[in-house]
Image (cartoon, rainbow, N blue to C red):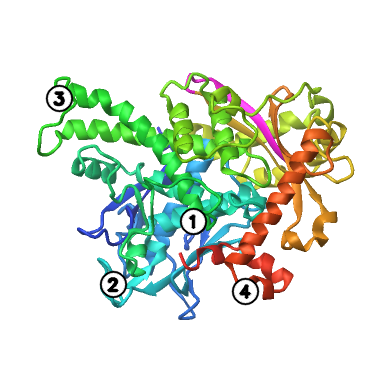
Amino acid sequence: MKFAIPKPSTRPLKIYATDPTQGYEAALKISIAVEHENLTPGPVGDRLEVVDYDGHAKVYYDSVDLEDPAILTQGGLDPSEADPRFHQQMVYAVASRTLSNFDRALGRRLLLSRKKGPNRLRLFPHAFRGRNAFFDRNLHAILFGYFDADESNPGTNLPRQRIYTCLSHDIIAHEMTHAIVDRLRPFFLEPTNADTQAFHEGFSDIVALFQHFTFPNLLEREIQRNRGDLQTPTVLVELARQFGFAKGDGKSLRSALDSEAKLSDSVSEPHDRGAILVAAVFDGFFQTYRSRVDDLFRIATGGSGELPPGHLQPHLAHRIAAEAARTAQRHLDICIRAFDYLPPVDITFGDFLRALVTADFELNPDDEYGQRAALIEGFRKRRIYPEGVVSLAEESLRWPVAPDLPPMTDQLGSLLPQLLRMEADRFSQGSHDAVLRSRAESRLSSGAADAESFNIQGPLAVALEAYARQHREALHLRDDLPIQVKGFHAVFRTAANGRLLIELVAQLVQTDRTSQVDAMLGGLEVRGGTTIIVGVDGTVRYAIAKPLPGLPGALGAAGVERVERQKRFVSTLDRLNPRFPYMKRAEQIEVRMSIRALHSGH
Ligand SMILES: [Zn+2]
């Protein structure tokens, strides 16, 4: 009798937990579980493709074959700075892990490409010589640079030691998040106000930092070392240490700990401003963590909470680490889930807070662990206030419920069930439940699911556009401008109480081209639009809008105010970069919207 061997749901791969040097000791090498998929040499998978062309040396390096039995039995190649094949493995592993975090929290399997057919995100571990790494939308790729450490102040590196940005967990996760954010909200790269690009930067740091807490070995070691205090500068809360030191700055690139930072108009550089968002989110995390481990400290100390000197008792360290990991994972999930509740354009940090609060309320109305309250408090401490709310009470922070509209079932008819089935199939392919997955595979190969998704997207977009046009007033859209439908997804999430929440999310965008001629806008167009959250019965539950000028009443006034804000911000940008006034319009836009330019000098 033959028994089928269940397909593995994950693949173990080794990485440097942070990067090849950690300052005070040899780098921690860990094994992480990444989603299992069939790989060809590269590695090349379903959504990611590593291309190891060295743009400086002009050579291709041999590609790693992670399906090679010799490599499989070792759980991947051992970490090595000298072997380009390990670099390929590490870039793939961390990028895949970052993607999985988004898949799980968003409740759907992300497609990284907007085009039909195989169009994977390409990762170039040795793309060029230089102290930079960046996601490039036009190349649909992440390019990692390498460089020699600073001669006079290399920190814990040797002078002129070769530094690879592709061996930094944080740099890989940060760039991968840029790529995903750009996929989810393509207009967030347009610098329409001081927060948009700062959000791109800050959010990418938030994901990279929280991922540290998902590595149990690293976490337990640091908790043991700092006796449970997470708010000391350690590799857990510091970002890209090796890179920062190698640049000659004498410190890590950035940190989650910024005790002073508060939001004000004077902070406009995107990384500095993004750091305030990071600090606000981490304030919330630290507060929740302290309240979650307080009882453990008390139990361990006979009620006093005062630890005796010396090492933490290992079981206590283990329990504290487990609680820190759980809390961090939940915070990361809350941050990622907020995405579906963000407006399609012109985001502010305040919008992010409102989206966090609304998305989490939908799943966990009771806020059992006090995480939502702690996040609100973190934002308040950093003076991040949303516009147009009367207080920071949770009820006023939640997006208002949409006005009563007829359900979409008339227009979308049979398309909705089709969309639901298709997305459920695709989601279960990426699911860690091997049984679900093999069932889905027996019905649809992944290629077929993709083809179907593009067949259904056409009619769905048409039907949705028709619905939006019919109800444009209630959805805060202008009647004289076309409506672009950007993305329409079904999402599946499990609430804390086990309830399954299924929703449909779409972004409706309008562009006011009459404003294009306005030089004050720095070549950027004026966009408005609405994100709609639709229940599975076809009713619109939330309509999260950024109104355009020209709409009636207060909405139009808010639109005018947004355009004025955009003008003011563009003039700030011009002052920050003295070369701007001498650039051609197309070049200005290119520089303003490029992550490469954002990262140079950082
Ligand atoms: Zn960045």
Q: At 29% across and 71% down in the image, what residue appears?
A: 154
* Circle 1 Cα neighbour tier, 10 Å, few/some/many (<14 / 14–19 / ≥20): many
**Mark toward the viewer: 4 or 2:** 4
Query: Which residue is most to the right?
Result: 480
* SS under mark 1: helix
Q: Which residues are magenta?
A: 496-508
Q: Assess whether mark 4 and mark 1 are in contact (beta carbons under 8 angstroms).
A: no
**Disc 1 within 8 angstroms of ligand 1 (CB):** yes
User: Quick one: label 4 or label 2, which is nearer the N terminus?
Assistant: 2
Where disc 2 sits, the SS reads: loop
Give left or right: position of 12 versus 197.
left
The mark found on residue 271 in the picture is 1
Marks 4/2: CA–CA distance: 30 Å
Q: Amino acid at mark 2?
A: Asn
| Residue 469 visible here | yes
Q: Is residue 572 left or right of residue 508?
A: left
Q: Which residue is mark 3?
A: 301
Q: Give the Cα distance between marks 4 and 3.
A: 61 Å
Q: Position of residue 380 (x, y in %)?
A: 48, 35
On residue 153, the disc is 2
Read off the residue under disc 4: 579
Q: Label for residue 599?
A: none
Amino acid beneath label 3: Thr
From the top left corner, tell me how far across and down residue 161 is, in percent.
30, 74
